[in-house]
Image (cartoon, grey):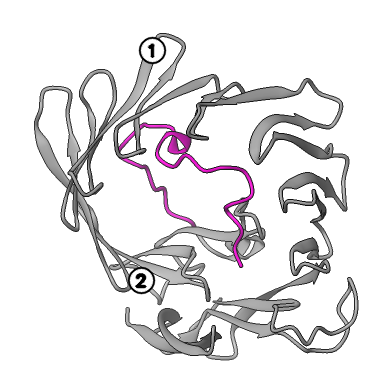
Amino acid sequence: MTLDIHKLQRLKNTLILPLQMITELDGRTVFSETLGYDSPSNSLGGPSYTGLITRKNETWTIPTGPLTSQFQSVPRTEDYVYDYAARLSAWDDSSSGENISYDARGNITSRSPRYGSSGTVTLTYSGDRLATRKVGTGTAVSFAHDSFARMTTDAEAGLTIAYNVLDLPERISQGTTLKVKYTYLADGTKVSALDASGAGLVYRGPFTYRRSSGGTLTFESAPFDSGRLTEAGTRYHITDHLGSVRAVINGNASTTTYPLTGFYSVDDFAPFGTKSTSSASTYLSLASFLFRVTFNWRLFVVLPYGCESRF
């Protein structure tokens, strides 16, 4: 299998930034996308001349046979519209979407689904600090912060968070149980993320190691421009214009067996980071991919609501 890397040039703050993207397997394009700015009217409104993205078209082209004419095309279009302050106020992909409201300070106050029966997410604040979050008619869960505006309690997940002198999360507990403890260098570089037994991840420069509760270190992975080197082999990443990983592929995958094997995941992302399995996976034989560490991913990245915007 060969993978072709293309350089995508995109305009940002008048600078042209190169971004390496894997888009082809053995010379056949499997993922492509185009971004629209002042394109014709989309499903949410007219064209915009503000430089903001108003439409994204992406297509998975999955080979189903050895001939270039043998493929299954899976297109997806997302439309976006913005308010007077250039904040995303709605997005839609014809099957899912949201309407988004803000307060005068730019905090998200509600996210209402455009399809289905999922409830509206309602957020309240104390100043700019998230105070409560409620989904539909459910019970609102509360969040607490210290005098430095750092979140110390996440009632939704039942977590309490303690910080070090660098304002970085140091200990995250659930009730009386320590879920993860972080250690850092003096400059804030993360050194380890371990659970109460001492097992977890240890970071040494670009290398990540798994640590057993007994202290034994085993190589886990290291990044390179187009993916990661893991203990199980090379894993290539197909990424979009933001660098988000849309598919993970085994470096030894065969491209002469159909449906294609060696794909571990094929994912779509909503504007605020919600991940879902792409319908393109229907035409693939997805391989089983087990993460070696059993931490809850939420414990690794503590983010305030709204900061995950993919724009």
- Residue placed most toward the observer, 76 or 91: 91
Residue 163 x, y percent position in the rendering: 36, 30
Closer to the chain start, of discs 2 and 1, is 1
Provide the residue span drawn in magenta: 286-311
Q: Secondary structure at mark 1?
A: strand
| 89 on left or right of 267 | right
Residue at the far front: name it. Answer: 147
Q: CA distance from mark 2 to mark 1?
A: 45 Å
The residue that disc 2 covers is: 254
Residue at the far top: name it. Answer: 176
Residue 259 x, y percent position in the rendering: 51, 67
Q: Are marks 2 and 1 in contact (CB under 8 Å)?
A: no
Q: Is residue 16 magenta?
A: no
Residue 195 x, y percent position in the rendering: 29, 24
Q: Toward which corner of the image does residue 252 lie, by quadrant? A: bottom left
Residue 286 x, y percent position in the rendering: 48, 56
Q: Is residue 122 above or below residue 74?
A: above
Q: Residues within 10 Å of mark 2 (few under 14, many from 20)?
A: few
| 15 on left or right of 61 | left
- Residue placed most toward the observer, 145 or 33: 145
The residue that disc 1 covers is: 177
Which dot marks residue 22? none
Q: Is residue 134 above or below residue 209?
A: above
- Residue placed most toward the observer, 36 or 307: 307
Q: Is residue 293 magenta?
A: yes
Q: Is residue 200 above or below residue 30?
A: above
Classify the position of the N terminus by image quarter: bottom left
| 202 on left or right of 23 | left
Residue flagged by tag 2: what amino acid is it?
A: Ser
**Residue drawn 50% across the image and 22% down it:** 159
